Image (cartoon, rainbow, N blue to C red):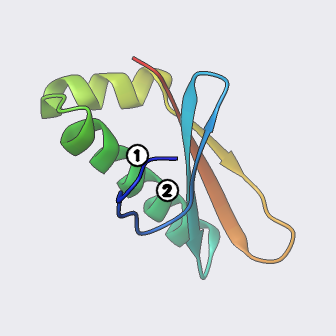
Amino acid sequence: LVKRMRITAPRIRVDGATVFVGIGDNPDAARAAASALAWKYLTKELKLREFDAFAFFSACVDLRFGGPAADIVLAAVPDP
């Protein structure tokens, strides 16, 4: 729990990673939402340069598709 932190979608800290929940009208929209949240975390909160964030995202971020009631994608960003 981080006091006074404003977030636009759910995020979960689990086993050395931050997981972002992307929800959309279809799988592509959910994937885009989760990816955008992970990208913002890497570039704004962790302050990685775009080149480094792109390399880290490509190599390490895990997208997990699924959801019982809606199109949901989880973007798991391991701690750098």
Furthest residue in direction bottom, as rendered: 25
Q: Position of residue 70 (x, y in %)?
A: 75, 76
Q: Is residue 24 left or right of residue 50?
A: right
Question: Quarter-wise, where is residue 32 in the image?
Answer: bottom left
Q: Nearer the viewer, residue 39 or 6?
A: 6
Q: Nearer the viewer, residue 2 or 23?
A: 2
Residue shown at the point (58%, 22%) measured from the top left: 16
Residue shown at the point (63%, 57%) measured from the top left: 73
Q: How many marks?
A: 2
Q: Is residue 30 left or right of residue 48?
A: right
Say few, some or many: other residues with alpha carbon within 10 Å of mark 1 (under 14 / 14 to 19 / 20 or more).
many
Q: Position of residue 1 (x, y in %)?
A: 52, 47
Q: Is residue 13 left or right of residue 65?
A: left
Spatial separation of the CA atoms under disc 1 and disc 2: 6 Å
Furthest residue in direction front, as rendered: 3
The residue wearing badge 2 is: 34
Q: Is residue 49 above or below residue 13?
A: above
Say few, some or many: other residues with alpha carbon within 10 Å of mark 2 (under 14 / 14 to 19 / 20 or more).
many
> Could you say whether the residue bearing mark 2 is in a helix, strand or loop?
helix
* Residue type for callout 1: Ala
Question: Quarter-wise, where is residue 17 in the image?
Answer: top right
Q: Nearer the viewer, residue 66 or 17?
A: 17
> Could you say whether the residue bearing mark 1 is in a helix, strand or loop?
helix
The residue wearing badge 1 is: 38
Q: Nearer the viewer, residue 47 or 25?
A: 47
Determine contact: label 1, label 2, CB under 8 Å.
Answer: yes
Q: Position of residue 50 (x, y in %)?
A: 15, 34
Residue shown at the point (25%, 32%) measured from the top left: 46
- In the picture, the disc for residue 57 is none
* Residue type for callout 2: Ala
